[in-house]
Amino acid sequence: MQPITQISSKEVYRNAWMTVREDVIRRPDGSTGIYGVVDKPSYALIIAIDDDRVALVEQFRYPLGERRWEFPQGTAPDRAELEPAELAVRELREETGLSAGSLMLLGSLDIAAGMSSQRGWVFVATDITEGDPDREHEEQDMHFAWFSRTRFEEMIRTGEVTDAQSIAAYGQLLLAERRQS
């Protein structure tokens, strides 16, 4: 069966972080429809580990109307695409002030494949050096803290951590650790 194909595309919205487009598509059965797509650049998510602790940031997530703890993560400004490792180094330093002596790619994540083209790269950062964060204006309310891995897992179980990317990335870390043992 032939996949969905794009007949035409129209940008309906743009800002510094994303574009939204409306595509006219042809389905495998030949019928047509409309698909809305949010295009955002790739992001990097960083699991910084120091002994048995992981670094989390907390910030107000406007669409949810609530503060959330999550792993440091983000995109380059103005929808720019950077090399994943370069973006990871930048986001970790920017949000936490941390620098990593070692950065290892764990895998990738699709943020919301049913509506967005955005993909993420998951890194583990070790051999950590602390410094001062250099946050973007939108991140001025951000807080950074270390949590034991046991406490972080409890935060997932109790709903204190609900960020899907952070939870999925931690799953990738656990699988990688299991493979190494």
Image: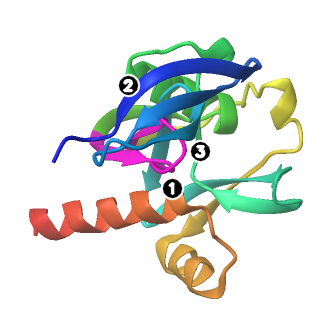
On screen, residue 40 above or below 150: above
> From which residue to which does the magenta span run?
105-123
Res. 51 visible in picture: no
> How far across and how far down the image is residue 101, in percent?
37, 31
Q: Are marks 2 and 1 in contact (CB under 8 Å)?
A: no
> How far across and how far down the image is residue 117, in percent?
47, 35
Pick whichever of labels 3 and 1 is earlier in the sequence.
3
Q: Nearer the viewer, residue 1 or 137?
A: 1
Residue that carries the numbered disc 1 in the rendered image: 165
Local packing at callout 3 (Cα closer than 10 Å; few below 14, some 14-19, many 20+) is: many
Residue 76 appears in which quarter of the rendering?
Answer: top right
Q: Nearer the viewer, residue 81 or 101?
A: 81
Residue at 70% from the left image edge and 76% from the top image edge: 160
> How far across and how far down the image is residue 111, in percent?
49, 48
Give amino acid for label 1.
Answer: Gln
Residue that carries the numbered disc 3 in the rendered image: 72
Give amino acid for label 3.
Answer: Pro
* Left or right relative to 51: residue 146: right
Pick whichever of labels 2 and 3 is earlier in the sequence.
3
Q: Is residue 76 magenta?
A: no
Measure the alpha-carbon separation of dots 3 and 1: 10 Å
Measure the alpha-carbon separation of dots 2 and 1: 17 Å
Q: Are marks 3 and 1 in contact (CB under 8 Å)?
A: no
Residue that carries the numbered disc 2 in the rendered image: 85
On screen, residue 74 above or below 111: above
Query: In front: mark 2 or mark 1?
Result: 1
Measure the alpha-carbon separation of dots 2 and 3: 14 Å
Residue 164 appears in which quarter of the rendering?
Answer: bottom right
Residue at 69% from the left image edge and 61% from the top image edge: 69
Residue at 56% from the left image edge and 34% from the top image edge: 92
Give amino acid for label 2.
Answer: Ala
